[in-house]
Image (cartoon, rainbow, N blue to C red):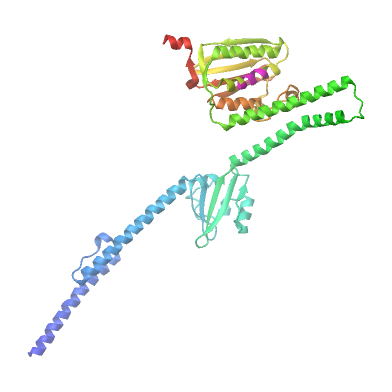
């Protein structure tokens, strides 16, 4: 065999070895591709070592990116589940892809079971169906019925490729607040309308020089004008008091109030207001002090006393009492008056709410007294409790927490 033949044979053998080398690595790579996993990536030699090392780095970065995306998705879903607003994702056919627990609660659906369902098959409110089909999502739609007495503000936001995000928010409190504001303005206007009309009419009459008035008529007209002016003054004072109570969370002038002297003072006020027409009694159990604003509590509890006098007929009785029970302090005013029907009791502390409109106005009430009581007690962490029986009398109790009950000066000195 010539040298040429030997050289060609050596080259052929070398090429065969190189081919086997590459074929072996390709086979290993093909086996790995059937079940690719970073930890099972085959090892190589030479150029394959560099190639597989690059592939290893790429896969490691890809897995790291995928893990980060997974963690981000998990954080997003956790955040979406924790949102106070409802979140629902819809596909191009308005079918539910995903919803958080708040949306499920708002619309009464099951997030897992109802996935893939057409949203209008589950939320059948006609305003919502018209809103979704209309395609104008510039403003939210209010859904006022069919959601457990809640009012929902629903808005659709388009994103991605034909995807929609449905956002729902419970605005029941805001709606109720708006209603209260409207009612408040209407009630104030109504309360002021009568005295303003009366005053305006009398002023025109007195200003008319052609109208001949006797001195008795003039005095009567001026007396009626003074009554209406006082009525407006009481209303404005109560409004200012209520506004001041609502502006701060707690009183700024707290002091240690001697309960016995405080209750006896309220009883003296009741006797003066009654003018001997009622039997007034004061029952005080336990000697202690109360931490609070004497001015605010005087105003609030005087309202309870004056109401008892106002709605108790001559010959009836009014009892003011203080007692300690389970560490809490309770001030109560019980009367033998006309009583209150049970259906009225939950609404007594609403502004301008009156059980008997005509009688309340005739007796000089503004309709704000018990609202003032409620706010003053709330600022002292106290609650107002009411029990009443129609025709037999009522009992209003202000219950103070243990944290506001302090020992009397004599008990403190003994300790």
Residue 140 seen in the current view: yes
Residue shown at 73%/12% (left/top)? 314
Residue 334 image position (x, y, % from top left): 63, 16
Residue shown at 72%/24% (left/top)? 360
Pick whichever, 138 or 208, lies toward us. Answer: 208
Residue shown at 63%/10% (left/top)? 281
Residue 264 image position (x, y, % from top left): 60, 11
Residue 126 image position (x, y, % from top left): 64, 51
Q: Name the chief secondary structure element in magenta.
A: helix
Residue 317 seen in the current view: no
Q: Was residue 243 drawn as part of the magenta stretch in this picture?
A: no
Q: Residue furthest front?
A: 209
Say which quarter of the image contains residue 284.
Answer: top right
Residue 207 sits above or below residue 404 on the image: below
Relative side of 207 to 321, left or right: right
Say which quarter of the image contains residue 94.
Answer: bottom right
Report the quarter where the C terminus lies.
Answer: top left
Residue shown at 73%/35% (left/top)? 189
The residues colored magenta run: 299-306
Disc tally is 0
Relative side of 199 to 253, left or right: right
């Amino acid at each position: 065999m010539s040298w040429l033949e030997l050289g060609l044979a050596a080259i052929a053998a070398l090429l065969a070895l190189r081919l086997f080398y590459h074929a072996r690595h390709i086979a290993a790579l093909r086996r790995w591709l059937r079940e690719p996993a970073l930890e099972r990536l085959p090892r190589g030699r030479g150029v394959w070592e560099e190639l597989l090392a690059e592939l290893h780095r790429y896969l490691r970065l890809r897995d790291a990116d995928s893990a980060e995306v997974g963690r981000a998705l998990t954080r997003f879903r956790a955040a979406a589940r924790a949102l106070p607003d409802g979140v629902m994702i819809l596909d191009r056919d308005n079918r539910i892809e995903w919803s958080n627990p708040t949306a499920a609660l708002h619309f009464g659906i099951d997030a897992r079971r109802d996935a893939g369902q057409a949203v209008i098959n589950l939320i059948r409110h006609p305003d919502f169906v018209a809103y979704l089909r209309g395609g104008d999502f510039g403003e939210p739609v209010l859904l006022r019925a069919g959601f457990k007495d809640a009012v929902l503000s629903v808005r659709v936001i388009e994103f991605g490729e034909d995807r929609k995000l449905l956002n729902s928010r419970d605005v029941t409190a805001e709606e109720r607040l708006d209603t209260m504001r409207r009612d408040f303005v209407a009630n104030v206007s109504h309360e002021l309308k009568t005295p303003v009309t009366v005053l305006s009419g009398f002023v025109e009459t007195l200003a008319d020089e052609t109208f001949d008035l006797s001195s008795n008529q003039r005095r009567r007209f001026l007396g009626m004008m003074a009554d209406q002016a006082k009525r407006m003054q009481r209303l404005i004072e109560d409004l200012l008091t209520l506004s001041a109570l609502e502006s701060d969370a707690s009183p700024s002038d707290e002091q240690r109030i001697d309960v016995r002297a405080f209750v006896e003072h309220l009883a003296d006020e009741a006797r003066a207001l009654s003018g001997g027409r009622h039997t007034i009694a004061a029952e005080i159990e336990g000697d202690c002090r109360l931490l609070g604003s004497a001015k605010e509590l005087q105003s609030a509890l005087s309202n309870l006393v004056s109401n008892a006098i106002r709605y108790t007929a001559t010959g009836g009785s009014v009892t003011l009492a203080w007692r300690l029970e389970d560490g809490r302090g309770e001030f109560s005013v019980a009367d033998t008056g006309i009583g209150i029907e049970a259906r009225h009791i939950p609404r007594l502390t609403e502004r301008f709410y009156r059980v008997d409109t005509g009688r309340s106005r005739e007796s000089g009430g503004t309709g704000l007294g018990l609202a003032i009581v409620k706010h003053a007690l709330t600022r002292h962490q106290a609650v107002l409790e009411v029990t009443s029986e129609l025709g037999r009398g009522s009992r209003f109790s202000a219950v103070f927490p243990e944290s506001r009950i302090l020992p009397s000066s004599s008990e403190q000195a003994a300790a």
